[in-house]
Image (cartoon, rainbow, N blue to C red):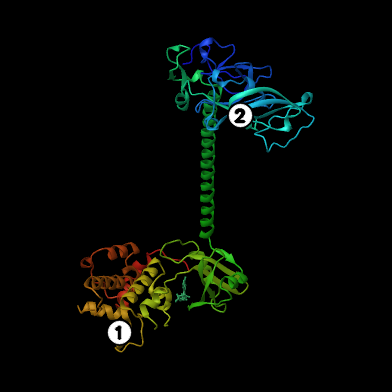
């Protein structure tokens, strides 16, 4: 630590810091090194007092490089040259100065009369002084000039650094070689004489406790601490705000998404103009169904749809109501979703989600354009003679579809060569009944097994008597189970008598109102 009473001081707030080896007047004697005395003048400027009453004002002290920048108050350092004897002070001109040669000079005080600003001939003319009609002029001692006619020689200066004489800027640099405190200062440590002895040449470094650090250092430390604290605080607040905003945005997005999905769950109603816009004026035809033509379309959010424009001359509107009423409520991954509908005057259309993989029909039958809906309809739907319409009617349709999928042909195909194959389910049953091969060959045995399984399940489902058809739950069980566990179904094409015998049971099925 600094010795008591020797803490760094300065003449004014932003003035040069005064510490060892300098000492400010008023500080205890041992605070500085001899000859490094500074004082504060009445304007709170830092003053360097040199021997023979030479006074210079200190602009800056560089403790690390051991340099001091000082200047004369009147702006003419050279005026002080007659009295400036650096040899008697601890200061030296800096290395730059020391490289300049020393010379002998004479100082003249000249009257304004005959004054010439031209100094090309002589070594130098510095610090023109106009007060009292005179000015000072230095020139090398080997002068010989009539220009000095109006001058009076004041003094001869022996071995003066040339640079000081010729210095036209009002700065003087001193360099002190001892005490060598620069290395301590470079490490931000304090510097003081060894053994606290004022005459000691050797110095030692010491740690500066925080409380004794210079005001600037303290300010810096407390400033950076407070700054750091506020920085961390503001960053935390910003992060927290960002987190809250993100959370809020996420919640908002979730709600929007939900509302969007919720809206999409219900089929939207479109005008006929909308339908024309969606299908780009019925530009791309996807196919033709029994009830109308299907066109490709695009909704405003770039979602592709298939628009079935219904033939307005067909039906009494019931199909339309059934389709919108039932399909609008069915949401299943395996069922085409009804996105919307149009009932605008006589124009009716159904808007479905677009299925890019084309119709199953095409995969089963290739390019052969027969219409098949009739083939899937259970007998009881066509005639009440066969019983009541129930959920078993759908089981029948499903069974017929299975048979068509496996057979790769229409169940009713008038074009087959062998007349006995016309009604495919009957043909399948007869072959199974006789224990004959179905003749369906797939690429591997495992697929043959699946095909046979689908046939048997298909036959079970397409029983003429609704009561003989399994429930959809049993159908799933059969499809998921082993083929070995399946029994061959009864003959779906039993005689009318047998059918009549089963009719009462059939009536117990819950009837679907049409
Ligand atoms: N959602 C869809 N996505 C893509 N193409 C479709 C879609 N719906 C129908 N199509 C195409 O339009 C054709 C006709 O479809 P539609 O549903 O009208 O016929 P269908 O089922 O064969 O007959 P219908 O139901 O009238 O008895 C299909 O074969 C298919 O190519």
What label sits on residue 17 in the rendered view? none
Q: How far from the left and from the top, in percent, is residue 63?
A: 52, 25
Q: Secondary structure at mark 2?
A: helix
Viewer-proximal residue, 336 or 152?
A: 152
Q: How far from the left and from the top, in percent, is residue 244?
A: 53, 41
Q: Secondary structure at mark 1?
A: helix
Q: How far from the left and from the top, in percent, is residue 138?
A: 67, 29
Q: Say which label, 1 or 2, has the lower sequence index.
A: 2
Judged left or right of residue 7, residue 76 is: right
**Quadrant assignment, res 398:** bottom left
Residue 292 appears in view: no
Q: How far from the left and from the top, in percent, is residue 457?
A: 29, 70
Residue 226 appears in view: yes
Farthest bottom residue in view: 417
Viewer-proximal residue, 45 or 270?
A: 45
Judged left or right of residue 274, residue 362 is: left
Viewer-proximal residue, 399 or 239?
A: 239
Viewer-proximal residue, 467 or 83?
A: 83
Is residue 435 placed above or below 133 in the rendered structure? below
**Which residue is at a point 40% across and 76% down the rendered structure image?**
361
Tags 1 and 2 in contact by the CB under 8 Å rule?
no
Which residue is identified by label 2? Answer: 164
Q: CA distance from mark 1 to mark 2?
A: 128 Å
Which residue is identified by label 1? Answer: 421
- What is the total number of numbered labels drawn onto the structure image? 2
Is residue 243 placed above or below 317 in the rendered structure? above
Disc 1 residue: CB within 8 Å of ligand 1: no
**Which residue is at a point 51% across and 47% down the rendered structure image?**
250
- Of the two numbered discs 1 and 2 in the rendering, the one whose residue sits closer to the viewer: 2
């Amino acid at each position: 630590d600094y010795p008591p009473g020797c803490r760094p001081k300065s003449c004014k707030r932003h003035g040069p810091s005064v510490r060892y080896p300098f000492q400010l007047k008023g500080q205890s004697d041992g605070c500085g090194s001899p000859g490094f005395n500074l004082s504060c003048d009445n304007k709170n400027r830092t003053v360097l007092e040199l021997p023979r009453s030479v006074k210079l004002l200190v602009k800056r002290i560089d403790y690390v490089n051991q340099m001091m920048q000082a200047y004369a108050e009147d702006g003419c350092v050279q005026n002080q040259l007659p009295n400036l004897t650096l040899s008697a002070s601890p200061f030296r001109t800096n290395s730059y100065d020391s490289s300049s040669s020393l010379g002998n000079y004479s100082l003249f005080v000249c009257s304004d009369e005959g004054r010439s600003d031209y100094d090309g001939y002589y070594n130098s003319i510095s610090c023109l002084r106009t007060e009292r009609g005179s000015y000072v002029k230095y020139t090398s001692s080997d002068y010989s000039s009539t220009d000095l006619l109006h001058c009076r020689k004041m003094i001869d200066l022996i071995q003066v650094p040339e640079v000081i004489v010729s210095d036209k800027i009002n700065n003087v640099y001193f360099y002190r070689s001892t005490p060598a405190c620069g290395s301590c200062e470079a490490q931000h440590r304090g510097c003081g004489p060894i053994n606290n002895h004022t005459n000691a040449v050797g110095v030692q470094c010491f740690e500066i406790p925080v409380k004794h650090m210079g005001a600037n250092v303290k300010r810096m430390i407390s400033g950076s601490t407070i700054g750091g604290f506020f920085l961390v605080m503001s960053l935390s607040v910003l992060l927290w705000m960002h987190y809250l905003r993100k959370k809020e945005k996420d919640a908002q997005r979730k709600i929007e998404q939900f509302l969007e999905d919720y809206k999409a769950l219900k089929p939207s109603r479109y005008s006929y103009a909308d339908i024309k816009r969606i299908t780009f004026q019925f530009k791309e035809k996807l196919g033709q169904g029994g009830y109308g033509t299907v066109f490709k379309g695009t909704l405003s959010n770039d979602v592709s749809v298939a628009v079935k424009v219904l033939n307005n001359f067909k039906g009494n509107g019931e199909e339309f109501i059934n389709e919108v009423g039932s399909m609008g409520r069915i949401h299943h991954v395996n069922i085409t979703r009804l996105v919307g509908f149009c009932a605008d005057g006589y124009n009716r259309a159904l808007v479905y989600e677009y299925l890019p993989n084309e119709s199953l029909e095409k995969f089963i039958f290739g390019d052969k354009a027969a219409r098949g809906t009739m083939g899937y309809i259970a007998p009881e739907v066509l005639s009440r003679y066969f019983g009541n319409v129930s959920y078993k009617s759908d089981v029948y349709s499903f069974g017929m579809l299975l048979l068509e999928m496996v057979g790769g042909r229409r169940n009713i195909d008038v074009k087959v060569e062998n007349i006995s194959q016309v009604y495919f389910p009957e043909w399948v049953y007869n072959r199974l009944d006789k224990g004959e091969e179905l003749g369906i060959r797939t690429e591997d045995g495992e697929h043959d097994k699946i095909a046979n399984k689908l046939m048997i399940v298909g036959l079970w489902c397409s029983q003429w008597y609704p009561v003989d058809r399994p429930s959809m739950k049993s159908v799933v069980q059969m499809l998921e189970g082993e083929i070995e566990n399946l029994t061959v179904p009864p003959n779906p094409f039993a005689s009318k008598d047998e059918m009549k015998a089963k009719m009462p049971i059939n009536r117990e099925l819950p009837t679907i109102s049409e």
